[in-house]
Amino acid sequence: MKRLNEGTYRVVTSRDNQFTACHKFTIGNENTQKNANSWGLATEAFYSAWIEALFDAPLEENLSFPSLKPVLSNNQRNFLHNHLGLNEDNSLALTPDCADLPYTLRAYFAWKVGLPIAFRTCGRGAANTPPHCGAANIKTEFTHGISSPASFRLVNEQLVNTVHSGSLRTGLEDESTDLYPIALSRQSLWPGTVYTDPYGHVLILVKWVPQTTTQPGILLAVDAQPDNSITRKRFWEGTFLFANLASAGPGFKSFRPLVRRTSNEFRTLSNDELVDNPGFTPFSLEQNQLSPDDFYTKLDKLINPKGLEVKQVYEATLNALVEQIETRVTSVDNSEAYFRKHPGSIITMPDGAAIFQTIGPWEDYSTPSRDMRLIIAINVLKGLPEKITRHPDLFLINNRDPADAQAEIEQHHARRIQELSIHYTRTDGSLWELSVAEVLARKPAYEMTYNPNDCSEIRWGAKPGTEEYSTCRRHAPAAQHTKMEHYRLWFREARRPTL
């Protein structure tokens, strides 16, 4: 991406070749910002363009960052870098986790452009009740002219100390929320749209890659992990988990807009005000009516409206799985780095469902959520051939018998998983290669491989007595393994318990 010089620019956006909005902005401007803007179509379009530019990269690049800081400090990615002319990005150390990431990006943009933001104090819900939130905490500090980095840090600190995964899993019909559900359409799903799954993981859409005659369409997103790393991912069933649970309101959501009440006050818009409001993405309960199968089918048709050949579908699914495996490599490597710095230490393991959501080193270096997603992803890839005969209308099979197409993909699958491989770092620092076939065959092991107190060899399913296992020098306490055996059924059934 070409670096933008100081000066005034305009961002123009369109949908279906029709003009939608224009926003003017200045880089390196030392003059005072205009007073108090409101969120509207132009600013949402500008925000969307900014998010897309932040995480832009060639499709073949495995885009990953150790935290948000190197993203925002890169003036070739961040066209709001030094927007206030204060060298304000030099002193920011932003390390949001999964739930914090969309809020931090929203707050950073509001600070730079001079917009209000809002966030609420929310509960975490229960087995039969989604989280519920209190009144909006509306921050207008950024609307009164240029705000200092210290002002932004203070607001962002308040924000990250308040929001959590429950803030995004609120019920779809609830309007005492920071975000609201939207329709599954290209007109609604802009870069910057938030996706929250029923178990608390959060992603942000960053780019639509259109389908061509030679390449499948792709919907790209980014997410943050407890270790603060940020990675770009593609939409598929193994990454975007969807289920109809009484404990959550999952799906694609937009931030609830803030508009002027008076010259100095702002308010959030209600669901009714967002149904037919041309200035914002419309409120919609469409996702509330969809089964998981319907949800994924509709998104697949949006991403590839012309349909795909079965091998194209398989390759896209395989590539997504490999991305997921490689991201797990980074997570396990991060835990090894921790133990090299803290030799002999033992990370405390929480009890019950808290293994999925806690604080401290366990949150940073354990991988129960990631391993459950890996198990789900393996199931999706292995189940693809059978899906061809169950839903032949989703594939371009050129009038062939679906059973023949299924057999062809089964043979293709057996060959391709032997051709691809990943490398992980063993305890002694050496690299060990695993074919994707070996990774898939070890699926039962991943029911017990999330504990960071175990060596990396164990966490990748190596068996005692093998050469691969020989470098293992660390084992979790027996009491922790006993607890893990009690929790193993959750992973075997790919069913995360409610906190």
Image (tube, rainbow, N blue to C red):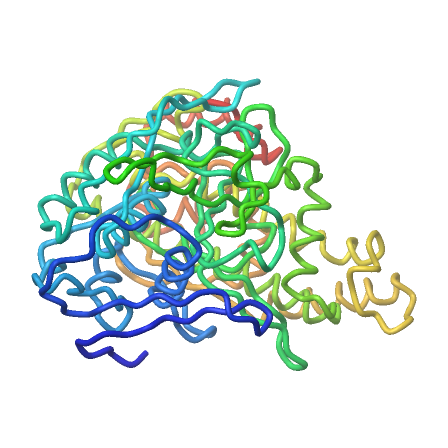
346 in relation to 196, above or below: above
Residue lying at 83% horizontally and 67% vertically, measured from the top left: 405
Residue 292 sits above or below residue 161 on the image = below
Quarter of the image where one finds residue 55: bottom left
> Residue 173 or 29: which is nearer the viewer?
29
Residue 335, visible in the rendered structure: no
At which x and y percent is residue 393? 83, 60
Left or right of 98: which side holds 183?
right
**Quadrant containing the N terminus in the rendered view:** bottom left
Q: Nearer the viewer, residue 325 or 258?
A: 258
Question: Residue 308: x, y in percent?
Answer: 72, 69
Q: Is residue 383 visible?
A: yes
Task: Please tell me which residue lies in front, 339 or 457.
Answer: 339
Please state the horizontal and vertical placement of residue 80, each as a whole percent of the image: 24, 64
Left or right: residue 250 versus residue 117 is right
The residue under the point 87% across, 66% down is 404
User: Residue 314 or 15: which is nearer the viewer?
Assistant: 15
In the rendered structure, the answer to whether residue 486 lies left or right of residue 405 reads left
